[in-house]
Amino acid sequence: MKRLRIAALIITIASLTAGFFFSPEKRIDESAYLNEVAPEVNFGEKKGMPPHYGPESGITAFNTYDIVPSIRGYAGPIRLLIALNSRGDITGIRILEHRETKNYVQYMLSHEYLKQFTGKNVNDPFEIDKDIDAISRATESVQALTKTVRESSRKVASQVYGLEVKGPAGGKQSGIGWILYLLLFLAAVIFYFVTRKTKVLLRSRDICLVPGIAVIGVYLATPFSILHIFNLVLLRMSSSALWYVIVISALISIAIAGRFYCGWLCPFGALAEFIGRIPSRKWEIAPETDERWRRLKYFLLCLITAVVFTTRHTEYGNYETYITLFSFHGNALTWSLVALMLIINVRVERFWCRYLCPVAAFTGLLSRKDRRYISRKDCPMANKHNPLISECIRCNKCYIGK
Ligand code: SF4
């Protein structure tokens, strides 16, 4: 395990270095898309403050990142090219670049969704569920997109055309998501410590796993993902309080109890575990084969770390089953993987968590040694006696105390 940790560290540092020196973030050439948002208008060079093209023929175009760079979605700014006429009406819009997880924002990126902004006046409310359609499972991204359009258009309308515009109000931010997540996390931490002392309460883990599926999976649709870590390392900060709660709580829990998240909160792990409890004959996997297969998740993590940090495109790391399942979005391949990973649990407990999950590999690599976990016959991870701590999800069944 020590060698694995060193290898992972070397790969991360080497990939980050390669990414920063050989693959700098490419600046998108917005001028190539001017014709798309304002057909038949010949703009000259970008000029002025705020930076904008035009106004030619009564139309001005601008890159929203030049105007409101601090507004961020779930994984960084959403850059748009917008065309605005002298009355303050949006006449064209296009997304230039974003870092949101595609599974969640596929519809938001579509022409069909974006066209609702066309024809709107800068003084319209731009409020989700009022004059802008909400998209379930992409709330944070849609809020950021709407705020970006509203604030940048009003600023350009005021400073370029001298129009009177409303203040920056509008677009209520929902605080319920991060509060729910934090409460669930704190409840899990309390139960974790209680079950180390009192074995009769071991079943209370289910009290966390069920809401984990319902709240983190179905309602918030934001399971902790390796993309959170990639975005953190690439300094692509979010404006979402939920994002910070997920990342900070995950890092704290790793420091305290290794793969605690896998055993107490992960909605996909919970589903896998419940399916694994269906009485059936389990497949016998020889210990050497099991050990070899468990290394696969570290190999996959190193591979995607190298690809993501070299290319700086986090979407290459997006093979996580829980993203497909809880975003309700994927392709034939990712949905097949989800189905296979769920079904196979009937015969092999927590198959995905044991062999393939990048979050399991990440949390496992950072788990601190603890010899008080000795495993037992009904271990949900089918761990051998005295297992590696990186394979223990801290269910506390076998915890032997001091
Ligand atoms: S080793 Fe013990 S604490 Fe860890 S998952 Fe297995 S039974 Fe639970």
Image (spheres, grey):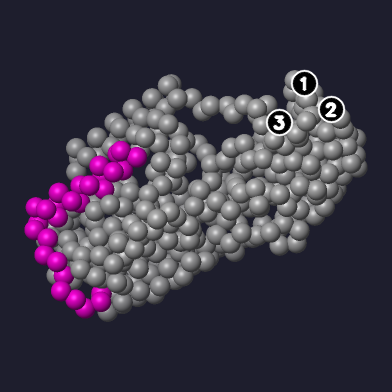
* Residue designated by label 3: 34
User: Residue at (52%, 66%) from the top-left corner?
Assistant: 219
Residue type indicated by callout 1: Gly
Residue type indicated by callout 3: Leu
Local packing at callout 3 (Cα closer than 10 Å; few below 14, some 14-19, many 20+) is many
> Which mark sits nearer the N-terminus, 3 or 1?
3
Mark 1 Cβ inside 8 Å of ligand 1? no
Q: Are marks 1 and 2 in contact (CB under 8 Å)?
A: yes
Task: Determine the image quadrant of residue 53.
Answer: top right
Q: What percent of the width, then of the height, locates residue 368?
A: 26, 49
Residue 380 in view, yes or no = no
User: Residue at (30%, 38%) from the top-left corner?
Assistant: 303
* Residue designated by label 2: 56
Q: Which residues are magenta?
A: 277-304
> Which mark sits nearer the N-terminus, 1 or 2?
1
Q: Which mark is residue 132?
A: none
Q: Quadrant of the C terminus?
A: bottom left
Q: What percent of the width, then of the height, locates residue 327?
A: 48, 58
Q: What's the CA distance linking mark 1 and mark 2?
A: 8 Å
Residue type indicated by callout 2: Glu
Q: Are marks 2 and 3 in contact (CB under 8 Å)?
A: no
Which residue is nearer to you in this view: 219 or 395?
219
* Residue designated by label 1: 44
Task: Name the element at disc 3.
Answer: helix
> Which mark sits nearer the N-terminus, 2 or 3?
3
Task: Name the element at disc 2.
Answer: strand
Which residue is nearer to you in this view: 187 or 13?
13
Q: Is residue 46 left or right of residue 211?
A: right
Task: Determine the image quadrant of residue 400.
Answer: bottom left
Magenta span includes 297 = yes
Q: What percent of the width, then of the height, locates residue 179?
A: 55, 63
Local packing at callout 2 (Cα closer than 10 Å; few below 14, some 14-19, many 20+) is few
